[in-house]
Image (cartoon, rainbow, N blue to C red):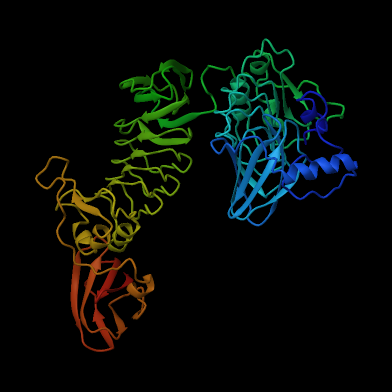
Amino acid sequence: MTKKNDKLSFVSGSKSEGCVSSVATVKGVKQTKFLFVSGVLLFFLIMGSALGVKAQGSVNEDRYITLTVENNQDVGLDLWADVNDTPIKIVSGSQVYNITVDEGWTGFSSYTTESNEMIIYGNIKMFDCSGNGAKVTGLDVSKNTALTGIWCNDDQISELDVSENAELEKISCVGNQISSLDVSQNLKLFEIYCQNNPFTTEAVDSLFCSLPDQADLPNAKIFILNNIYDDNYEDVLHSNRENAIDRNWKVWFYDDYSGPLADTDVPTIGEFECGGVNMYRYITLNVKNGENIQLDMWGATGETPIKIISGDLEYNATLTDNWTGIRDYLAGADVMTIYGNVERFDCSTNGYKVTGLDPGKNEILTKLYCFGNQLTSLDVSKNTELNFLSCLENQITSLDVSQNTKLVDFSCSENELTSLDVSQNTELTRLWCYDNPFPKQEIDALFCSLPDRTNLSDAQIYILDNASDENYQAVLSTNKKNATDKNWKVWYYDNYSGPYANTDIPETTGVYDCNADVDDVYSSDLALYPNPVAGGFTLETQEHGVLEIHSVTGEKVRSVQITSDKQFVDVNDLSSGVYFAEINGRVIKFTKK
């Protein structure tokens, strides 16, 4: 943890200067210690109160710090104001504390939370919320741009954004869950304590590269490790401290302030160079050796360096924040890796030349085009920034997009998908999924998983290309009302410009209700045996009427009138496979041997 002197040495004199003994100078908060004061001093204090002496001015509510906190807990804070007698208001739910803070540390005081948020209003210059553990999980300092020092040690904060705090001189965020830290906007910063956070090698290198150049401040230092026993010691070891040293920063161990490694250099062996290709971020393709692979890319900035490696072949290029246009890259092996900060990536229409794609090491991807290849699988679970995904015309058998909550446009048509769940894609407005072998019940499930667009602009799902689709009958036997009730149009695609393009598919005949219990729809009061079926089966049900048997493609292959609670149904002439028996909206699945 950060030594107390870290905090004291940041200000002139000791922390207790400007305070009376060990009593906090916070006014208006019940204190736990009492001082003996002279009768004269006590007299003037009483008279001051009687005369209504108030703090200078009112609380500046345009300047504040927000904590994410655990409800119904005592949170400890230590504050330092711009000037003496600064009015401060601390609010959490209905709990409000009005206090006065001087230009000096108040000493820690406890404030009870009555919600999951605590806001500290007023002209605070330095702020300390350390030692609260799980009671503090978030810290937002963006609305107090005059802060010069932040201490938040030993809490459970996962993110610290200081991009708005240009006056910051010191940060101490030891022992949290912070995975990255960018200080590129903090040009006055000269001291950082950030050990015991789960920084990866990439995060450490990124932090070093974001350090402001402190040529005029020879004592700038960053404590990145406590000692060699830190959990991420190996991660730091494989970073390149020279990037910090080049910016006139010392990269030191803290070692509990007084250990043998305290204030000594941290060794590193990495070779990462700031401004070069980000070798931590990459996309991997499985390719046909000796063939030209067509790629189109878009960089994260106007000058984004990238490197493409395939066997002994290496290509270096600089991307802009626009498409480069399609270019050929010769494969020198059966793997091609694209390194760098690529924000949009297109490897489409390579056909047999591209059989695999792994974008998982490029978490900043926002658009991915990979249609017209021979992919059999695609994992985009790490690409949480994706808002556009086009993977049609492949051979993908399953696709999980539950982590891609920012998806707006999604095309997965002409694959081998048998199910698709888009319930987590709440921003989705267009979905192309025609020409996949979805069985009837999975189409109903897909309709039910569509995000609700009620009171929003309508959305479109292209579930069929045209009436010649193999699962045309399966689609027509579903209940598209489950989609239209959520403001989705259920349309034909028809090769984009055909006569049916962007028109409603016919009325469907299914009665599946998304709001019904699945067991109520699929076989809760139906019994079918034996299953698998040889020549026929016995159906037990209280539902009487027409029993329809459908194949997995939705084709109706048999209709039987059910007139008794227990009736034998002959299916001897049906081909082997999976079928669905439906009566009055109730469905049961069976297998024909």
Please identify the residue farthest to the top as the structure is shown: 216
Residue 258 spot, x, y in % from top left: 87, 29
In the displayed structure image, the side of residue 488 where residue 128 appears, left or right: right
Is residue 465 placed above or below 246 in the rendered structure? below
Residue in the picture at 77% in, 32% down: 226
Q: Quadrant of the N terminus?
A: top right
Residue 492 spot, x, y in % from top left: 17, 49
Q: Which is more toward the observer, 566 or 307?
A: 307
In the displayed structure image, the side of residue 227 where residue 399 appears, left or right: left
Residue 311 spot, x, y in % from top left: 48, 22
Q: Quadrant of residue 384?
A: top left
Q: Which is more toward the observer, 125 or 395?
A: 125
Residue in the picture at 19% in, 51% down: 491
Number of marks in the rendered image: 0
Residue in the picture at 37% in, 34% down: 367
Q: Quadrant of residue 557?
A: bottom left
Q: Which is more toward the observer, 1 or 112?
A: 112
Is residue 209 placed above or below 44 in the rendered structure? above
Residue 22 spot, x, y in % from top left: 85, 40
Q: Quadrant of the C terminus?
A: bottom left
Q: Quadrant of residue 269?
A: top right
Residue in the picture at 78% in, 31% down: 228
In the displayed structure image, the side of residue 86 where residue 532 appears, left or right: left
In the displayed structure image, the side of residue 307 where residue 124 appears, left or right: right
Q: Which is more toward the observer, 533 or 564?
A: 564
Is residue 515 placed above or below 425 in the rendered structure? below
Please identify the residue farthest to the left as the structure is shown: 499
